[in-house]
Amino acid sequence: MTYPKIPLAQTIIQLCKAKHVKHIVISPGSRNAPLTIGFTHNEYFKCYSIVDERCAAFFALGIAQQLQETVALVCTSGSALLNYYPAIAEAFYSDVPLVVLSADRPKHLVGIGDGQTINQNNVYHNHILYSAKLKLDLNKHDDSQQENIPIFKNLENKLERFLGLQLDIQEHNEEEICKALNLAKSEQGPVHINCPFDEPLYERVEELSVKVKADEFELVYQNVDTAERDDCIVNWKTASRKMVLVGVNQPNQIEQKWLDALASDGSVIVLTETTSNLYQPDFFPSIDKLIAPMNEAHQKELQPDILLTFGGLIVSKKIKALLRNSKPKQHWHIDQKKANDTFFCLSKHIQASPNQFFSEFLPNVEQVSNSNYFDLWNRIKLTRHKKHAAYEEQVPYSDFKVFSHVLKAIPDDSILQLGNSSTVRYVQLFDLNKTLKVFCNRGTSGIDGSTSTAVGCAAISMETTTLITGDLSFFYDSNALWNNYIPKSFRIIVINNEGGGIFRILPGHKDTTNFDQYFETKHKLTAKQLSHMYCFDYLKASNESELHAALNTFYTDSDSPKILEVFTPSKVNDEILLNYFKFLR
């Protein structure tokens, strides 16, 4: 087998294999050549070549999101690793395991004016679980390097000293690499390993010069604190109004019996976001549709005694406003790692998985028989559902109408990736097909990597993947299509309303030159030329009949992935959405 000659590169590759880091996303460069040689010549690893580092990092995030396994990123020195930062921040807040392997110059070549060189150590310090600072291997054939190390001056036995010093370096590097890889797995988040390599970079050998010793690592799950559990049981039994709110959640993560147990209690309502991937007939999806028309008195009437949350970050601004204005007496959050005080009333952080907590908690609580809390909310749900259907039927061609048609066309048992901003908020208004698996980058909620994440997801998944995205997000991340890993089953639906339509919904002075240029950012771009350049089949629709016709063939088998670009009238979308909430009242 072919290996890089540099011992540090051999060490990294061996430890990645020992820690089961199988998927490696590589961006081309020279300084990272030792790692590229090692990973691509080892059959254990599945390697991907993505030129644009920002796209590469979100591509890796899409893979890790699906597999729930650590995915490695490999880049050269300089600004390359800075381009990873948006995805690193997203992984940090979304609990996605990534490991950045950034090649670096030796310390004596940093800060002297060499090209493609920045201060790389600890560069992600605000958004990383761990930053491993590796040491440069010693080169026993390089006398100039040895003369720069004080220990070698005026010593007769240079070789003995060299071997001892190199052994210390090797032990340090193995310890740092193992620590980083273990944390990525146990804490589910990004880590950074900075790897200094000296030239020559491209030399290869047929035998390993170092043998690594990977520490044994086993995930340890923390038990639910017994006293805390018992306190929760007492409080739950005496509360007549309990609200469960679920944010971002992996599909099939929560056992159905616990969902059914929550739904069967008349004193409990379960509000689910689209990204929760939870479906139960008595749950309450489409949160904004439920609560947007409520006045302050109605909100107070429905104020919960206990708020129980689990899952990731919440999309709905309306539920945040409701719970901040009408605070529950207690807010418990279930998560092994962290608890955000989103509603400014956090009282308990239950450090366990939802399944683990529910298994010890729900069998020990009794249903409250004299509560009408569920009935109050359910009457609202039924009324809103009828109103929504009536509005959907009468509304003219617009973003709202397009989403109602598009969401019904997505095949069963497939993956739906959502862009941020308007896209995810529109989707939250509709009842989704319960067989879909829904994903969205809600850690930082940026538009910058939605397409790349969806491509990474599609590349690793055996299921049809559909990305619904806005025009600005799509064009911003168009380099996401520049790779060789996009399956022919991949589908992109671009809602093109010629700008940042969400800004028309927000407060501000619309229909001015300043607004059009600096907020909505009006444009006349289309995806047609990009589709041809990247070998996608291209379909378009500018009205309802064209949309129906396009959707009839959009999911048929083809030899290429497809893009459907749907053009909507930018000047009426905001009015139709705002009128929707008025109509619900």
Image (tube, helix red, strand yellow):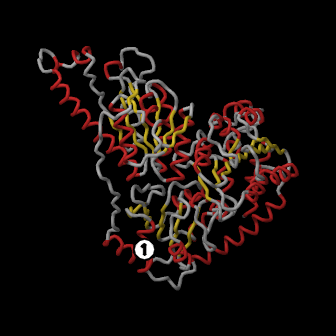
Number of numbered tags placed on the structure image: 1
Residue corresponding to mark 1: 359
* Quarter of the picture holding the N terminus: top left
Q: Decide which of 82, 491 is in the foreground and name it.
A: 491
Residue in view at x 78 percent, y 65 percent = 389
Where in the figure is residue 487, as x and y percent of width and height?
66, 46
Residue in view at x 28 percent, y 22 percent = 139
At label 1, which amino acid type do we have? Answer: Ser
Determine if residue 348 is in view.
Answer: no
Query: For mark 1, does the 10 Å Cα neighbourhood hold few (<14), some (14 to 19), or many (20 or more) residues?
Result: some
Q: Decide which of 246, 202 is in the foreground and name it.
A: 202
Can you say whether 53 is above or below 67 in the image?
Answer: above
Can you say whether 292 is above or below 500 in the image?
Answer: below
Element assignment for label 1: helix
* Quarter of the picture holding the C terminus: bottom right
Q: Decide which of 546, 264 is in the foreground and name it.
A: 546
Residue in view at x 68 percent, y 47 percent = 490
Where in the figure is residue 278, as x and y percent of width and height?
58, 65
Residue in view at x 40 percent, y 55 percent = 338
Determine if residue 413 is in view.
Answer: yes
Where in the figure is residue 74, as x and y percent of width and height?
46, 35
Task: Answer left or right for 362 relative to 284.
Answer: left
Where in the figure is residue 248, as x and y percent of width and height?
54, 57
Q: Which residue is farthest bottom? A: 369
Quadrant of res 315:
bottom right
